[in-house]
Amino acid sequence: MAEFPTTFTEPHYINPTEIPAHLAGPFVDLGRKGIVMVAGIEPANVEDLTKIAGQEGVLEYCPKDIATRWTDIPTTQKQLAKDGGRGVFRAESIDTGDTVAFGWTGKSSDEERAYLPACENTFALRANEAYRGQGLGRHVSRAIVAGSMFFYGARKIGLETWASNTPAVRSYLGASAVLVTTQDSMRPTRVPEHQDANGMRRDVRLYMQYPWSM
């Protein structure tokens, strides 16, 4: 079972040379693009996470981020302690110090395991919209999974996402995730033309896993 941090920790800037060769690739690729991966977050990072959580794309697909996960320092602390801890990683621009993306892994919920029975841990990624369109998602996704495997001993990592969130799906497939199953579902939407009378729209929940983390 993975052992994740349950609170804020001193951020660790990851040098690709400290990662085993079979996991180091995404860290090297990001370095060539001027991005370093950082394991762990401190309270000073919360403002960046909150800004990303408040972006339109995240509000559309992951409204709980700004509402209950990365709202402020207290909610972030609660999220870090959830279900035995969260391994949070940031992708940081070497030139500007901007948070290009962040994501996390942690123990899967009972609901997730019902659809991903082979997975013990769950993964999530949030991208800074200012850096989208550069093909970074697949590299950051792989780096978060690889970093979770190396630093926290995590294995059997899966994820869930919405089929209509095509940039996210593209990133996960690019990071060698595979589709396990799907579920027709309803979700809230901020797009008026997609809303029913209750502000909901029909979508498909995709359940995926990273075979290389097994």
Image: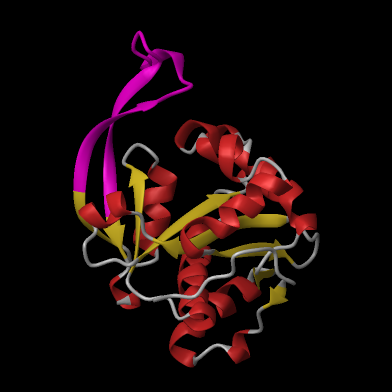
Along the horizontal axis of the image, is 155 left or right of 204?
right
Who is closer to the viewer here, 118 or 84? Answer: 84
Residue closer to the observer: 73 or 27: 73
Q: Is residue 211 above or below residue 187?
A: below
In the image, is residue 60 part of the stretch drawn in magenta?
Answer: no
The correct choice, above or below, for 167 with respect to 32 in the image is: above
- Residue numbers of the magenta segment: 182-207
- In the image, taking residue 113 as reference, residue 30 lies left or right, namely right
Look at the image and tell me in which quarter the C terminus lies: bottom left
Residue at (36%, 59%) from the top-left corner?
A: 108
Q: Is residue 136 visible?
A: no
Relative to residue 131, is residue 108 depicted above or below?
A: below
Q: Give the position of the N terminus as an image quadrant.
A: bottom left
From this viewpoint, is residue 147 visible?
yes
Residue 200 part of the magenta segment: yes
Residue 44: x and y, percent? 80, 56
Give the side of residue 15 with respect to residue 121, left or right: right
Between 55 and 158, the one lying in front of the other is: 158
Task: Point out residue 33 in the picture as x, y percentages from the top left corner.
Answer: 64, 69
Residue 180 coordinates in the image, percent (x, y): 20, 57
Q: Residue at x 25, y 32 (%)?
A: 185
Q: Position of residue 95 (x, y in %)?
A: 80, 64
